[in-house]
Structures are given as C-alpha cells and as structure tokens.
Amino acid sequence: MDELEKMLEDHKEGKISSEEIKEKILELPYTDFGETKVDTFREIRKGLPEAVYCPGKSKEQLENIAEVGDRLFTRAEEEDFEIVRSVRDDAKFKEKARMIVLGDVEMDVEGEITVVTGGSSDVPVAEEAAVTLEEMGYSVERLYDVGVAGIHRLLPHIDFLRGSDVVIVAAGMDGTLPGIISGLIGTPVVGVPTSVGYGTAREGRSALETMLNSCATGLAVVNIDNGYGAAAFVHHMLKEG
C-alpha cells in the first residue's frame, strides 16, 4: 500500500496523471506467501474475482489465501470450507456447486443466463457455473435433465432459451446437447463437456470432441468439467467495457 499511497500523493502534486496511475495499478504486485501468491488485483485487471482451485492446497495455503480479500474457491470439500471459515466467518459453502464464496463478489452487471444440463449427473458442473454468475450479480435460470435420451423434455423450453442472453449447456455421455440447442436458437451457447459416462466416454473427452465438431453456429466450448471457465467467459461477453 505504500507504493499506492505514494502514487496518490504524486497525483495530487501533479507529478503523475490519472492514466499513469491506472497503468501502474494494473502492474502492482500480488500478496506473496511464498508457495502461494495471491493475485490481489485480478478483479481490476480482468473484471472478475480470483477463483482458487482447492484440490492439492494445504491448510496453510488456504488460510493465507482466505486472509486476502473476497474471492471464490472451486472444487471445495467440507474440510476446505472449515479451514476458510476459521479465517473468515462470512464464508459461504455452496455444497452442490462444490464452491466457497468469500465475502461479497457482486458487481454492477446485467444479463439473463440459462444453465442447462443433459442429465442430473451433470448438475455439479452446471452449478459451478450458475453459482459463479449469481454471486457476481447475474440473473440465472436453471433447466436440468433435458438431454437427448428424452429430447421431448427440452422442446417446450425453446422459446424461453431464445429469450436468454446466453445459454450454458453442461453435458456428458455423447455430448450432443449443446449443438442441438445451438442449432435451434440464435442465442450464444457455451458448451461444457462433463466427465460423466461409461467406457468410451473417456472421462469427458468424447463429449468435448463432439461439441468441438458441432456444425451449429454460435457454440463455444470450454474444457471438461470447467463450469467456472464457462461462467468467466460469459461474464467477459456480457460485462461493459
């Protein structure tokens, strides 16, 4: 903070312009805990809060990260939540999404997003996307278990999907649902392949390849099980500036 205070004093004295301050803020350092270096200016630089991937992190690393600002923790277990809550009593555990929300990450955003799943087993990945967007302040609707094994479950909702700003579709197995939806509506669709499926589903790689090979226009695809990545992409599409 000393560097920031010096910049503000220099600005007050006319030694540095507002634009130069903005540029320098974007280059300010992270908080360094040795093994963990917390990106404290992620929100300024990228327009969304840092997401912390919990698997593989030690108790000390999670405690250090929790001390520094408001952020999201993904792929969290109950044990991770207890560690974070010991540092910040305002932490919230979103069990279905496997996420911890630390503090208030809501922003000044607008947009209506619908999150769709092929099956109920895809819901944890879908919830990661839905909760991330809700916590940032977006309006999120859910349409779950409408996959191609019973496509009649999807058809009554097509007009509703057309009214969304973006549709996120999480699907495993054959991974065809995002392409089908994208072919039926003019709304941008983000496909999220999930690792749900037997043998040749190859832990989501078959679904990923199907989505990438779709001939439906307006479909973008993120990595396997990456609900947060889908939410971040949608935020970058919809945010102003």
Image (spheres, rainbow, N blue to C red):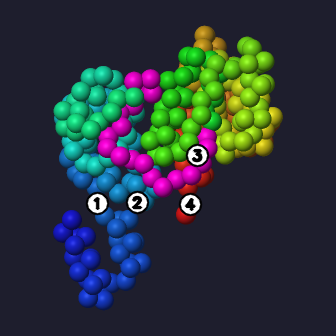
Looking at the rendering, the stretch of residues picked out in magenta corresponds to 95-113
Q: Amino acid at mark 2?
A: Ile
Residue 70, placed above or below residue 185: below
Q: CA distance from mark 2 to mark 4?
A: 13 Å
Instruction: Pick the quarter of the image with the C terminus.
Output: bottom right
Indicate which disc residue 234 carries: 3
Image spot of residue 105 (x, y percent): 39, 47
Is residue 101 rendered magenta in the image?
yes
> Residue 136 or 98: which is nearer the viewer?
136
Q: Counting residues from the N terminus, which is met first, the one under dot 1 or under dot 3?
A: 1
What residue is at 35 percent from the left and 46 percent from the top? 104
**Disc 1 vs disc 3: Cβ atoms closer than 8 Å?**
no
Mark 2 burial class by Cα count in 10 Å: few <14, some 14-19, many 20+: few
Secondary structure at badge 1 equals loop
Mark 4 burial class by Cα count in 10 Å: few <14, some 14-19, many 20+: few
Residue 99 seen: yes
Q: Disc 1 marks which residue?
A: 29
Secondary structure at badge 3 equals helix
Q: Amino acid at mark 1?
A: Pro
Q: How many marks?
A: 4
Q: CA distance from mark 4 to mark 1?
A: 26 Å
Residue 220, image quadrant: top right
